Image: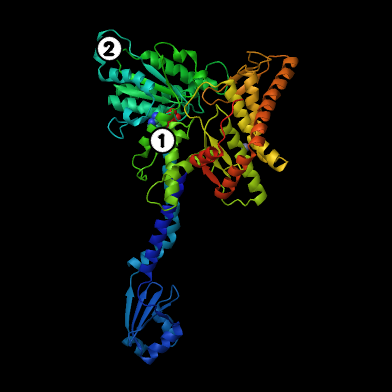
């Protein structure tokens, strides 16, 4: 559509230019003066006229003083008759050079043709462009069943394992695939059955696509990339035909890798009817299965597929001989995050002693894609401040921006509100630092970001997978620290704590129903919860307990909260002096980095207490 309209604009512009050029051609030369026939008669009688040129109806009169004039005559009557009728002096007329010219000059033709042909040309041109467009559409319809497959040849933009940080186990698994593509004989001679399909599973942005390309790059074979969602069209059968086409193309280029991205788009369990339109998906899936079964052992085409929903995949896809290899891509740990940051720092101008490890520490839970994006944000930030290099603080600022949203520097806050925020955040920080088993405080800030009025950044020191009950209770207390601090300092609470309270309540409930950490209810889970595997979001919660147990659960949840509240209150009241020091420092500086905060805690001489 965009192309069509730009074509029309071009056509109209071209014609406009032509018109202007023609009109200049026609009107070249000085503007002649108009005469009436009577004036002409008078001039002839006075002997002023040197020459009269008649061309059709147009008469051009040249006077003796070289000026020219034009006039028109009646169409039928000869000019001389007209002049005679008006009483011209025949003697004088005989002295005038009379010339009759055929109307055949360029001027005549242009004069006649341009006005009549121009609209015609415009119309024809528009039709032509529209038609050409429609023809493109028609030929598109003919290639409908063709896969929109993208080919990356091995040596252009080559990606290798070196470009993929971390993911050690995944790489080790895939090295076999690379080796097979390079030395198939070794495997075939011994009668080994080579994997045909490898399924890469992992959260969005963990590098599935990147790793698949790296496999092709390592093996030096062509890489065909197609997204499974492109298989699915409005019409049943198109997906199957596209699948066939993709496999045929890739097989012709073997040894090669065919990468099917987001395979869950078609590979969902069949017959469930979830998601609608599953006829088309089923056919496409069946076709993929047929293709996977159909190629010979030495075809040397390896199909890689990626998904972040392995839980919904059809069992038939995972059967031996199809995607029987499964490679798990985890979110990077701190070391890997640093390595990923280093890879993406290439080609960016950083200050000399930049410490990417610090950024890695502050980004637990970030995927590779998040980290790549983080450095880009930092670069944009530095450029917008007209810096020549990217500074450490730009990187750390971007972490907070990605986590909490951009800083809202323009927001006007009253002094009272600022004080409340300072004491609220100081409360979180103090309770956190006063307890054992809590994560270190990395930053305290009263700069408003996103929806948060301020924030306390505390991050796990190393990726721990297991958490103890004591740690959870400490965490609950830290969450309530802000609320308690407001309450104790100002004798009142604000809405600023609502998000903390919500999170604390959710966590307390999880302790009871999910982790079996309530002493009264015992080591049991309650409710049947389905979660989206990598996204950690609940999609359904089914209640499988009685009313009585439900109220017991509520009591236990509230007991956890009360316990945490008491701990927070004890800390805030007994350490009120330090609370004030932190809050004052915040009011003065707005941000406290880890070192500054630790310094305050050290000066206060307070030790972490056990609960
Ligand atoms: P996925 O396909 O798993 O959603 P991608 O492979 O498309 O994720 O990753 C997106 C981008 O994130 C990559 O292009 C790369 O820049 C970056 N990235 C992700 N993981 C890594 C990694 N392990 N090492 C280096 N870069 C990575
Ligand atoms: Mg991807
Ligand atoms: Zn808070």
Picture residue at 48% right of the left edge, 31% below the top: 364
Front tag of 2 and 1 = 1
- Give the left or right position of residue 551, taking residue 55 as reference: right
Expressed as whole percent of the image width and height from the top left, the position of residue 217 reads: 30, 28
Question: Residue most toward the top?
Answer: 191
- Give the left or right position of residue 561, taking residue 594 as reference: right
Task: Please tell me whether mark 2 sits on a helix, a strand or a loop.
Answer: helix
- Give the left or right position of residue 258, taking residue 491 as reference: left
Task: Please tell me whether mark 1 sits on a helix, a strand or a loop.
Answer: helix
Picture residue at 42% right of the left edge, 34% below the top: 140
Expressed as whole percent of the image width and height from the top left, the position of residue 158 reads: 30, 32
Q: CA distance from mark 2 to mark 1?
A: 42 Å
**Residue linked to disc 1:** 357
For label 2, count other residues whose C-alpha is less than 10 Å away and answer few (under 14), some (14-19) or many (20+).
Answer: some
Tell which of 562 and 171 is nearer to you. 562
> Can residue 490 be seen in the rendering of this structure?
yes
Who comes first in sequence, dot 2 or dot 1? 2
> Can residue 148 be seen in the rendering of this structure?
no
Q: Quadrant of the C terminus?
A: top right
Tell which of 419 and 120 is nearer to you. 419
**Residue linked to disc 2:** 187
Picture residue at 51% right of the left edge, 24% below the top: 534
Give the quadrant of residue 103. bottom left
Give the quadrant of residue 272. top right
Indicate which disc residue 394 carries: none
Indicate whether 401 appears above or below 76: above
């Amino acid at each position: 559509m965009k192309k069509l309209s730009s074509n029309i604009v071009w056509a109209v512009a071209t014609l406009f230019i032509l018109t202007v050029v023609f009109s200049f051609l026609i009107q070249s030369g000085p503007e002649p003066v108009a005469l009436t026939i009577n004036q002409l008669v008078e001039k002839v009688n006075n002997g002023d006229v040197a020459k009269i040129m008649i061309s059709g109806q147009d008469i051009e009169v040249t006077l003796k003083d070289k000026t020219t004039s034009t006039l028109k005559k009646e169409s039928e009557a000869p000019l001389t008759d007209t002049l005679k009728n008006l009483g011209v002096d025949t003697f004088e007329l005989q002295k005038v050079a009379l010339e009759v010219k055929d109307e055949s000059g360029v001027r005549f033709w242009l004069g006649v043709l341009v006005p009549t042909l121009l609209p015609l040309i415009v119309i024809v041109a528009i039709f032509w462009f529209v038609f050409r467009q429609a023809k493109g559409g028609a030929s598109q319809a003919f290639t409908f069943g063709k896969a929109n497959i993208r080919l990356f040849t091995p040596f252009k933009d080559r990606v290798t394992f070196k470009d993929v940080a971390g993911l050690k186990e995944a790489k080790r698994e895939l090295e076999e695939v690379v080796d097979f593509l390079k030395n198939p004989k070794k495997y075939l001679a011994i009668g080994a059955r080579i994997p045909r399909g490898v399924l890469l599973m992992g959260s969005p942005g963990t590098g599935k696509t990147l790793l698949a390309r790296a496999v092709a790059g390592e093996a030096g074979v062509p890489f065909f990339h197609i997204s499974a969602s492109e298989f699915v069209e409005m019409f049943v059968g198109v997906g199957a035909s596209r699948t066939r086409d993709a496999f045929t193309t890739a097989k012709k280029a073997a040894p090669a890798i065919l990468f099917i991205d987001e395979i869950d788009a078609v590979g969902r369990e069949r017959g469930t009817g979830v998601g609608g339109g599953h006829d088309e998906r089923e056919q496409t899936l069946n076709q993929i299965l047929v293709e996977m079964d159909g190629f010979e052992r030495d075809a040397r085409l390896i199909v890689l597929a990626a998904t972040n929903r392995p839980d919904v995949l059809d069992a038939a896809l995972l059967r031996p001989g199809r995607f029987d290899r499964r490679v798990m891509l985890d979110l990077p740990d701190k070391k890997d995050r640093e390595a990923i940051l280093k890879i993406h720092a290439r080609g960016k101008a950083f200050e000399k002693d930049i410490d990417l490890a610090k950024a890695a520490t502050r980004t637990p839970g970030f995927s590779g894609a998040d980290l790549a994006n983080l450095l880009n944000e930092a670069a944009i930030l530095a450029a917008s401040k007209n810096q020549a290099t990217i500074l450490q603080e730009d990187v750390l600022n971007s972490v907070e921006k990605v986590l909490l949203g951009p800083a809202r520097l323009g927001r006007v806050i009253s002094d009272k509100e600022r004080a409340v925020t300072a004491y609220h955040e100081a409360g979180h920080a103090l309770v956190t630092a006063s307890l054992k088993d809590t994560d270190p405080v990395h930053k305290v800030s009263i700069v408003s970001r996103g929806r948060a009025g301020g924030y306390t950044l505390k991050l796990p020191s190393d990726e721990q997978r297991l958490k103890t009950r004591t740690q959870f209770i400490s965490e609950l207390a830290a969450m309530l620290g802000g609320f308690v601090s407001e309450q104790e300092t100002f004798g009142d609470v604000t809405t600023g704590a609502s998000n903390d309270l919500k999170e604390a309540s959710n966590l307390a409930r999880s302790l009871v129903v999910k982790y079996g950490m309530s002493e009264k209810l015992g080591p049991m889970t309650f409710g049947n919860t389905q979660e989206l595997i990598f996204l950690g979001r609940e999609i359904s919660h089914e209640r499988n307990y009685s009313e009585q147990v439900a109220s017991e659960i509520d009591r236990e949840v509230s007991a956890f909260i009360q316990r945490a509240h008491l701990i927070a209150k004890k800390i805030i009241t007994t350490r009120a002096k330090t609370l004030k020091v932190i809050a004052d420092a915040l009011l003065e500086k707005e941000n406290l980095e880890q070192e500054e905060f630790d310094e305050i805690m050290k000066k206060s001489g307070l030790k972490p207490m056990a609960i």
